[in-house]
Amino acid sequence: MPELISRIIDNRLISGSFGTVTFGPWGLEASDRISFLTLDDHSRHVQHARSDVDFQNSRWQLEYQTRHPQGSNAITLSARFTAITGGPLQDAVIRLVFDKSAIDHGIIAGQKFRHRDSDKYRLFPTRKVQLQTRDHHKIDVTLDHADGAGRFAPYMYLRDRDACWIVHARLLPTAPIDDIWLRWANRFFTLTCPQKLARLIWRFPGGKALLWRLRERWGRHAPEIQAVPLNILKPGQSLYLEVTCRFS
């Protein structure tokens, strides 16, 4: 059995290896309409100092842990994102990235996928994603615990993008939905549909089925248009995710 090696700095996995498999960085993401939080240098409209997270229009507290016990072939990540002032969120995510070179295929919800650089978010209400390596090892990513405060439901997705496999354990808004963000984005600008019209389109027969995270479902060559639900967390409410990645 190969040795599982991890490099963890400031409680965040930066890189790791398991035989021929390399992976990292891993981390957390959360966002609303304007602000986007990540643990690397790609946050937008966010002030983040230790556990304090200030979005442009709301304040939050983040508790994030990465655990790799000595000699173990498993790494556990956990995140609790708590509303201080209250505000809307479109999702909260634990994100794992693996280099594609040593991985033969991925499996989610009983479906097998090979890496085609499709950039499709293969999203399912499931608790497990598996990657199988070319030398017959397995990587099992499980969503062990999820608490959406009654407003968010757990999902996982498997995505083949560029030179990576990306796995997300994700909390997404569940009905009743507080807000709908219907947007068209490109590299020059982002257009947002007026809220009342977006709600009308969402409720129109077929509107939700067609537009819900359209770009994510269709992949790289889809138009950058999709409907994104948001739900509001009240002060004191929190979202929690705990994910384990096992190598065998």
Image (spheres, rainbow, N blue to C red):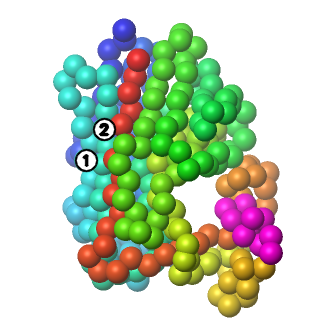
Judge whether residue 211 is colored magenta. Answer: yes
Neighbourhood count class around disc 1 (C-alpha, 10 Å): few under 14, some 14–19, many 20 upward: some
Q: Is residue 78 above or below residue 136?
A: below
Q: Which residue is mark 1?
A: 65
Task: Please provide the residue range marked out in magenta.
Answer: 205-214
Q: Name the foreground residue: 151 vs 180.
A: 151
Residue 49, quarter of the rendered image: bottom left
Verify CB contact (< 8 Å) between mark 1 and mark 2. Answer: yes
Q: Residue at x 80, y 75 (%)?
A: 205
On the image, the x and y values in percent for residue 239 come to 35, 63
Q: Name the foreground residue: 167 vs 15.
A: 167
Residue 63, quarter of the rendered image: bottom left
On the image, the x and y values in percent for residue 181 come to 62, 77
Q: Residue at x 40, y 22 (%)?
A: 247
Q: Residue at x 37, y 43 (%)?
A: 144
Neighbourhood count class around disc 2 (C-alpha, 10 Å): few under 14, some 14–19, many 20 upward: some
Spot the residue most to the bottom.
196
Judge whether residue 116 is colored magenta. Answer: no
Measured in 3D between alpha carbons, the distance from the residue under mark 1 to the one under mark 2, in whole angstroms, is: 8 Å
Q: Which residue is mark 2?
A: 76
Task: Answer whether residue 239 is visible to the viewer in this image.
Answer: yes
- Sequence-earlier tag: 1 or 2: 1
Label the magenta part by its dominant secondary structure.
helix
The dot on residue 191 is: none
Q: Name the foreground residue: 80 vs 193.
A: 80
Q: Is residue 193 left or right of residue 248?
A: right
> What type is the residue that disc 1 sits on?
Gln
Q: Is residue 55 left or right of residue 212?
A: left
Secondary structure beneath label 1: strand
Secondary structure beneath label 2: strand
Q: Name the foreground residue: 212 vs 97.
A: 212
